[in-house]
Amino acid sequence: MIMKAKPFIKWVGGKKQLLEQFDSYYPKEIKKGTIKNYIEPFLGGGALFFAISQRFNLENVYLSDLNKDLILTYQVIQQKPDDLLDFLESYQKEYDFTEQEKRNDLFLAIRKHFNLQRFEINYKKLSDNWVSRAAQFIFLNKTCFNGLFRLNSKGEFNVPYGKYKTAMIFDAPNILAVSQVLKKAEIVQADYSACFDRVTQDSFVYFDPPYRPISQTAAFTTYTGTEFTDKEQLKLANFFQKLDKEKKAKLMLSNSDPTNENPADDFFQKAYESYNIFKVSASRAINCNGEKRGKINELLITNYEYEPSTLAINF
Ligand SMILES: C[S@@+](CC[C@H](N)C(=O)[O-])C[C@H]1O[C@@H](n2cnc3c(N)ncnc32)[C@H](O)[C@@H]1O
């Protein structure tokens, strides 16, 4: 039997540890099987997609993210998993056989190649150089500092080496399982708003935008080279409202809870005032070094009622 697919990269804001809590908040229609379309327009590591797609019977899946190399990697896993595995195996061997003190040089060499190669890539058409790029993307993700993805103003990936004693760059059975699960998905590099035409009344849309920083010192990553400012958060809230009114789809959105830091901050209550706002408890990095971890609340916003069995606290 094929194993269950799970995220193949580390991603800031990954929802793996929150899946169990999120479970009670899925629309009841997805549990009954009347929702057939799943849409995730801030895909990242895709934890929710993997959980939902292997549990419920979906007919159509639309996955998108603005990050070009992330989407390229998903497309390579979907279409060329065996070629990708060949590359990943050689990177793993190279890493394992390189002495500890020379691994930083190996990392920097691969990072340099990855950055130079971006000029030769045609992101619109799958080609052989996509496969090596996807392998490099995964290698860098698993060996860089905290799995961060950060681009400088020139569009160069600039996260330093993570100094790991061992690094498991990939898990072959998982890559094959991911490829299988992705078979029925449409995977698109786009702004979240491009999903509008795909949304229907029988769709479940899950939004996991970049977190609104919980403090001035909070970890902030521009996954795509552009910041997701408060203005962007409000634009997204308008889009949420538009989908609710015009498409009548089931919508769920998560974000950081600003009241963790400032009890008077009602940014999300205002932005989503006509919707349900719940708090779930998360453990995540709360400063820029990712060293300080603590229990904090995270917000979950829906345009539908949740199953009454949950223990969540409503506002
Ligand atoms: C919080 S992460 C998603 C985490 C993900 N759900 C997981 O479980 O790993 C936010 C994602 O939004 C993407 N993003 C940022 N701005 C975007 C935009 N305007 N449209 C679509 N995706 C965007 C980033 O590239 C990043 O992958």
Image (tube, rainbow, N blue to C red):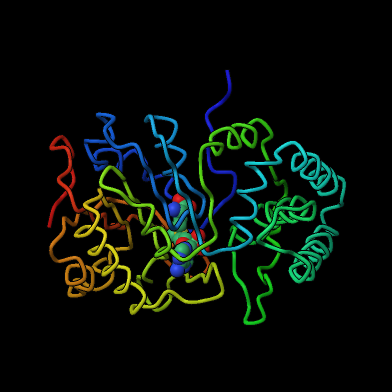
What is the quadrant of residue 271 in the picture? bottom left
Residue with the most extreme top position: 1
- Residue 95: image location, x then y, percent: 81, 49
Residue with the most extreme front position: 197
Q: Is residue 277 left or right of residue 23?
A: left
Residue with the most extreme bottom position: 153
Residue toward you, 116 or 19: 116
Residue toward you, 39 or 70: 39
What is the quadrant of residue 157 in the picture? bottom right
Q: Is residue 273 left or right of residue 30?
A: left
* Number of numbered markers: 0
- Does any portion of residue 291 appear in the rendered image? no
Residue toward you, 7 or 181: 181
Figure check: 290 above or below 295:
below
Residue at position x 24%, y 38% in the image: 24
- Residue 214: image location, x then y, percent: 35, 70
- Does any portion of residue 184 appear in the rendered image? yes
- Residue 247: image location, x then y, percent: 25, 54
Residue at position x 50%, y 59% in the image: 65
Residue at position x 22%, y 64% in the image: 241
Q: Quadrant of the N terminus?
A: top right
Residue at position x 38%, y 71% in the image: 213
Q: Quadrant of the C terminus?
A: bottom left
Figure check: 262 above or below 96:
below
